[in-house]
Amino acid sequence: MSSTSLDAAASGHGEESNYLNAHPGIGSWLTTLDHKRIGVMYLITILTFFLAGGLLALAVRAELFTAKGDLFTPDTYNKLFTLHGAIMVFLVLVPAIPASIGNIVMPLMLGAKDVAFPRLNLASYYIYVFGALFMVYTLVSGGLDTGWTFYTPYSSSHSNSSVTSALLGAFILGFSSILTGVNFMVTVHKMRAPGLTWTRMPLFIWALYSTSLIQILATPVVAITLFLLTFERTVGIGIFDPALGGDPVLFEHFFWFYSHPVVYVMVLPAFGVISETVAINSRKHIFGYNAIALSSVAIAAIGFLVWGHHLFISGQSELAGSIFSLITMGVAVPTAIKVISWIMTLWRGSIRYNTVMMYTLGFLWIFTIGGLTGLPLATLNTDVHLHDTYFVVAHFHYVMMGGVLFALICAMHHWWPLITGKMFNENIAKPVFWLVFLSYNATFLPQFVAGSRGMPRRYHEYLPEFEIWHKASTIGAMLFGLGLFLILFYLVASLLKGAKAPKNPWNGLSLEWQTSCPPPEHNFAGQPICKKGPYEFPETLSA
Amino acid sequence: MIPFLLPLAAQAGTVEPASFLLPPAATEYAKQTDFTWNFILITDVVFFIILMGMMILFAVKYKQRQEGEKTDPTKGSHLLEAIWAVVPSILLLVFFALGFQGWINQAVPPADSLDVRVTGQKWSWTYEYGNGIKTFANLKAGTQDQYEGEGLVVPAGKPIRLTMSSQDVIHSFYVPDFRIKKDVLASRYTVQWFNALEPGEHQVYCTEYCGTAHSRMMSRIKVLSAADYSAWLDKNTPNENEAPEVKGQKLFAANACGSCHSIDGSKLVGPSLKGKYGTIETLEGGATAQIDDTYIRESILMPAAKVVAGYAPSMPAFQGRLSDDEINNLIAYIKTLQ
């Protein structure tokens, strides 16, 4: 690329000089302190693990195509679903949006040069890679067969698989998560551009802020828990194993005290993405800015008090179960407010049907199903029937996988011009959306039916009466996998021969669009100043 | 229909057949749960139609005709948000109350319940009646619906209280037709109860992941009429005068030994026991061992001590689970497998 531009003097950088080409060579990437480059490295790493976790899922679905356990041995199947869950939760969903897209976009949205602690940011990435290496070691050294939940005493005293390395991996990954959270919180507090008040912050920032709060408060608890479990397994100190005088339900409490809030670590950033994309493509102010921003914080706060709904049938007291059910109902309210706010944003808008908007509406469909099917799981007597069946599997895939993944795909398309400086081919992307959306529903809707009819989860073989639902689900999953490969294909193709992105291709008002696509190394030519909110589009101004 | 916030109806109804989304409801408690389910389902469908109807309507009606066209300047509505917070809150409280009602009914087993002890172990369920009767139902190797053993046999129209514990990891005792499920732990007893309306058979699953054969840890509940049940009780009173190998054969089945050790020479997870007594086997590591009473006893109590070459040390230890008498009976049975 040429760097001889007449515009160079005005911006202080050559027009063609951007963060991607400012420093050449792989070494400049691996030692970069630039939040955008770190975000890109996160994105590539996370997508690589998503591919691994996805292929494991397809292997699981292939086994379940028939009722008999005829493809893998039971032990192999148990390792497949465990590794699928562990990789997807710890390596993909938790960092998916904040560490990759958030890292790239957040400082730009704030009008900042970088995050508050760039070195800490790079350290977070390498801690993530270090933890991931433990998971890779687990994968190749005998696998893991405990389920991603590591329930004791199976994990501590019964499993013959590589539990210790997986525990250490998850333990280390937690530190990456905590440090990113700290970094983001300080950045939001201290690095906002002049004029960017709290109520002018894009809702994506509010979501990342709430997410960081949960990461900082909840992750240490799971770190300690996994550490105790490692001790029990390696040294034989009895904490959770009844044979050693421990209490397995204590482990469940510790584990879910983290692992329920972590659901919101996954899904709050997804909410943030949707708030941005629904407003910008409706050319209209987001409906109920305060309600959406504060409901993120409310979800983060109430989310800490509902872990016991994973333990309704565990033997915890009936009183505790009742209280947890009641509080869980409370989380549904702020979530419902978000959904109605997004839908009301469409009202009397001028809706632009690009790929991003299609994934946004697809998210709303999927998340609404995910949310509504959570209600019989929050309710006591219906949960007793549905707990640990495929109904739960379908529900959390709708919320976590559907919600987070659709938002991640949406975010990747929305900020693709900003990240790569290229436009992807909308004419290919739109039909692929329909394949992805329809096959997604074909995969998981049948699982609700199998589950409410009583099909238990984590079954290698199952009764023939459930076969039709599993067959439909497996066919859907294979098509879904194909759809995701097609997305990868056209996005990579856009890097090679996509059109050059213009500045601000979607006519956004938030600060990340007020610089070039892709941005220069230090984000902005001068100090950007925020003069109005991110959703005050010119179309809404009355004549 | 179940009256709202009242105790369970008298046990006089009939089994509700399976619907598209639910298995048969074979207890009054199950019907109460289904009432909650149906109430939530209808609410969910109504809200789904409202929300997605609005979304699709707006998405079609407000499609962009030309770039830069005017849009509505509304930034929100406190009234709409307040309504949207209050109406769902009320419905959520109704869900909670319906769920709580069933929860309390399940939490308090009737005083006149018949007690059965349920023991979960990798990977079978056993039922003890307190009068010496011990039953089980284990999947026959290679099948998905053929059982060895009668399973949990109970009379219809009588509340049955299950007091449950585990010998090893966490299991969970799930009966879809009764809408009941509870984890089974080694650290404490857990309790659940049911009152089956009519004679029939019901599926039992383990729903807490417990290792290799988790998906085969199924069992059966057989509900008999009161008269049939009392005849069954008479017939199954334990007979102390049986020969040791006959008792051993029953123990072999009750402890699900056959799910890993065949008696016909075929290789399963563990070695077949056919014709093994008295032979010399090569062990993992190269040593050899004579298959005698001492070896069998040790292999039952501490299976990892001497593992036959070519097999994984995956058998659970039966230390503390079988008495000396029971082990002797098992050895007597294994001797007969020639």
Image: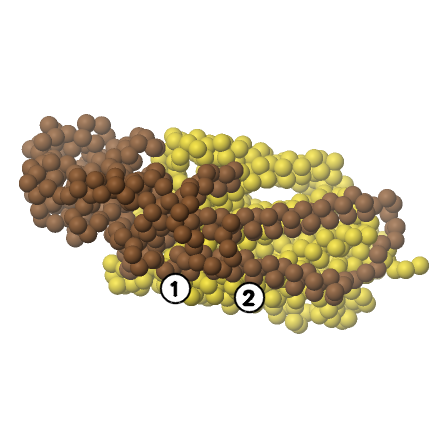
Name which residue lies at 78% across and 43% down: B60
**Lateral position of residue A316 relative to residue A444, left or right:** left
The dot on residue B244 is none
Kind of residue sitting beneath label 2 = Ile
- Relative height, residue A526 to residue B33 (above, below): below
Residue closest to the eye, B305 or A104: B305
The image quadrant of residue B279 is top left
Q: Mark 1 lies on which chain?
A: A
> Residue A60: percent from the left, percent from the top?
45, 38
Which of the image's four quarters has the C terminus of chain B? top left
Q: Residue at x 9, y 31 (%)?
A: B336
Q: Mark 2 = which residue?
A: A302
Looking at the picture, how far across and down is residue A330, in whole percent?
A: 57, 63
Chain B drawing hue = brown
Residue A84 at what x, y percent from top left?
A: 46, 45
Pointer 2 local density, CA inside 10 Å: few below 14, some 14–19, many at least 20: some
- Label 2 lies in what chain? A
Q: Colour of chain A?
A: yellow
From mark 2 to mark 1, how far is it between C-alphas? Answer: 21 Å
Which residue position holds label 1?
A317
Q: Which of A473 and A17 is in front in this view?
A: A473
Camera sees residue A212: no
B56 or A443, which lies in front?
B56
Q: In this view, does A239 lie above or below B49?
A: below
Amino acid marked by disc 1: Ser
Secondary structure at badge 2 equals helix
* Coloration mode: by chain
